[in-house]
Image (spheres, grey):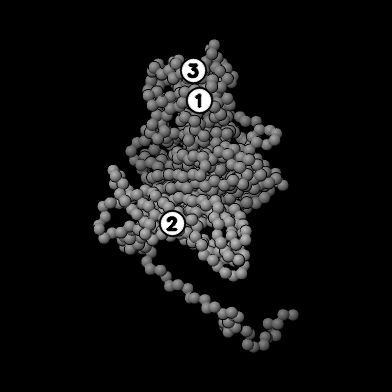
Amino acid sequence: MAAPWPTNWRVYTKDEFCVGDLVGDESPATIDIVGNEEFPAVFFQFENNTVFFRMRLDRSPIALDDFNNFNWGVLLNTNENDETYQWLLTVNGSGGVNGTIELWENLINQPPNSFADQAEGISTMGPPTPNYTEPVTLGDNVRIVPTGDGSDFNGNPDFFIEWQINFTTLSSFLNITELSPLSFCFYTATSNRVPNKDKTCGRPRTLSECFGDTITLRPLPPGTGILNIQKAIHVGPTIVEENTSNTWHIEIIVQNIGTGPVNNVVMTDDILLDTVTDVTVVEKTPGTGDASYDPVTKRLTWNVGTLNAGDAAIIRFDITGIFTMTGFRTLNEANVTGVDPNEGEIFAGPARGVAITVRPAGEPTEPLINVEKNIIDGPLTIPQDQASAWEVRLTVTNTGNTFLSNVILSDLIELDDILSVDSNVSKGAATFNNRTITWVIGDLNIGETVTGFFQISGTFRGCGSRFLNRAIVTGTFAPEEGDPIIVESNISSGSVIDVLCPTEFVETVCVITDKVYSHCQQRECFEDVSFDIDCFTFENIKFKSGIIVDGTLNMSPITNRPNFKRVRFTIRIPFEVETEEGTNITGYLPDIFKDIVLFIPDNTRDEFNFKIVVETSSKVLGDITQSDNLINFAAGVFIIIKVVGRVQLLIPAFGFCPEPPRCEEFSPDGDICEEFMNQGFPEFFPPQYEDIEE
């Protein structure tokens, strides 16, 4: 028997605002989710050991006392990584009056951060089967009621569809408690396994854009610990060949996101390769317990210990092994348990991460899209809990032989506390939701490369070697026959950040150094540069660092905008042409005039001076041609402009640098005496009879 329906509902939010949705963005109206700040689109509640969900629709999904042939549901995320979902709960109206409430597990996260990721249910083998079903009884466990609050988004009164599920049933599948972190993505669909119609939050293009704020079903008591676990593949292929050995580098982060301690924290990670040949722990947070791998159960167990409020513990390890069965496969599955002094045993997981595509032997495994990530500005060594900023460059290239559409990059930010994220992309548009940057690139021609620059700031709470972010790209190509196919790139994580524990600092010291107060980047393109090299034959060209031309720098205040100045100057970039005859000829690209706005603090003493510094990276675009004495080429210039001041900073230090190694003396023919001095000492005396081998 169903539980009594709530009289008060909790509005579900995103970024602490009511979740709404556009009217008329889906048809028919029975699956068009509607709402705004005055009339929120979606709600939830937890009462009487029952979880309730409510969705505002443009029209009633009931006709002649029968369901329309659609689905109304919610994706459930249990691990705070909004690029994936773990469970799907749907009201399946395809059976009409015999509709069902169904719970499906998403075992294979493929494709990543995509609404095309179908839930598999009980198993990835055999026909799809939900983990749990119960028949719909209208008015009992599912209700269709007029909203009664005056909302009529399309000129007609709107309706609520409401459904419920027993929490004991739900928690037995989801492995959650009343205080486990959850986030939701409400949707409508034509399928009971995939959210393929309307979704909340306007027109979200990815899962991370749809999921709202993290909640707990029961309000969190003060001093209560909450565990969270996240897993990411940072190095390794996403497409492999069956029966071929590969290695992946895994990072698992266990966090206490509550307000009290959690004791006896234990992480287990089940390796799902068909054959595991090696598991090696590379690094784990200092002060945590042992980590051991059992080859019989294929399980890695890490005794973390106690996590205080806000603490994070990280383990990084390599897995080597073989998949013997083709299809979409999960590499490993991590869970964590612990004991809260007030609530008893608590747990979180599973965290699965991106799925691996296993192809039959002989099929190509090279991805059709390549993504590269570089940290171009920011520290690679920082203290724990110190706010820092980085600039990251991501380049995406269509490396295949087919046109790609709907290309989307998902970049998971792995800072424990994210302060800001800004972007500047050469194509498409980028947004930031929860912990994920979504860069919708759109179409990508064969060989085309696009570039995005992302400014990220925040802190790491867990010390050790950390990755700043992890990027993966998906796209779609249309074969001559059959349905469109979604393809994905390699995984790109870039450089490791060394996060220092407080005990690693020897001392804090004052240093006098240049501090960057503000900076920006621009680029220039010269389509046709001509240069006279006299009667010589061109061989090569090398660019030198750009300079600000003497006498061109001018800084002036901006009315009604304190601490910012208009900065004008001319940049000149030298180059040197090398000829086959051995002569080098110096030239310059056309002058670059800049008129920009930069942050330059006003309240400084008269003696303090700011410097404007430019850094350039120039390259030839296309081919260089020579006609008589002239060479012609196109050139592109990347420019970073900085405001620099000389200051005294307090920084952590490890003492003075150690004694350097000895210099290697150059010897064109080698040092015959040194070779002799390093030879082993010979036997000085003849052997005895018993020492001679027969």
Inspect the image, locate mark 3, and give the three-letter code of the amino acid beneath it: Arg
Q: Position of residue 241 (x, y in %)?
A: 67, 47
Q: Secondary structure at mark 2?
A: strand
Q: Position of residue 569 (x, y in %)?
A: 39, 54
Q: Residues within 10 Å of mark 3 (few under 14, many from 20)?
A: many
- Label 2 or label 3, whichever lies nearer to me, is 2
Rendered residue at 42%/70% (across/down): 658
Inspect the image, locate mark 2, and give the three-letter code of the amino acid beneath it: Ile
Q: Which residue is mark 2?
A: 571
> With respect to residue 668, does 404 lie above or below?
above
Rendered residue at 61%/40% (across/down): 404
> With respect to residue 680, does 207 lie above or below?
above
Q: Position of residue 540 (x, y in %)?
A: 59, 63
Determine contact: label 1, label 3, CB under 8 Å.
no
Q: Secondary structure at mark 3?
A: loop
Q: Which residue is mark 1?
A: 25
Q: Position of residue 574 (x, y in %)?
A: 49, 61
Q: Which residue is mark 3?
A: 59
Q: Is residue 376 left or right of residue 99?
A: left
In this rendered view, identify the residue nearer to me: 159 or 232: 159
Rendered residue at 61%/47% (across/down): 447
In this rendered view, identify the residue nearer to me: 694 or 59: 59
Check the image and name the residue furthest to the bottom: 685
Sequence-first tag of 2 and 3: 3
Determine contact: label 2, label 3, CB under 8 Å.
no
In this rendered view, identify the residue nearer to me: 292 or 485: 485
> With respect to residue 314, does 474 lie above or below?
above
- Label 2 or label 1, whichever lies nearer to me, is 2
Q: Residues within 10 Å of mark 2 (few under 14, many from 20)?
A: many
Q: Secondary structure at mark 1?
A: loop
Sequence-first tag of 1 and 3: 1
Check the image and name the residue furthest to the top: 64
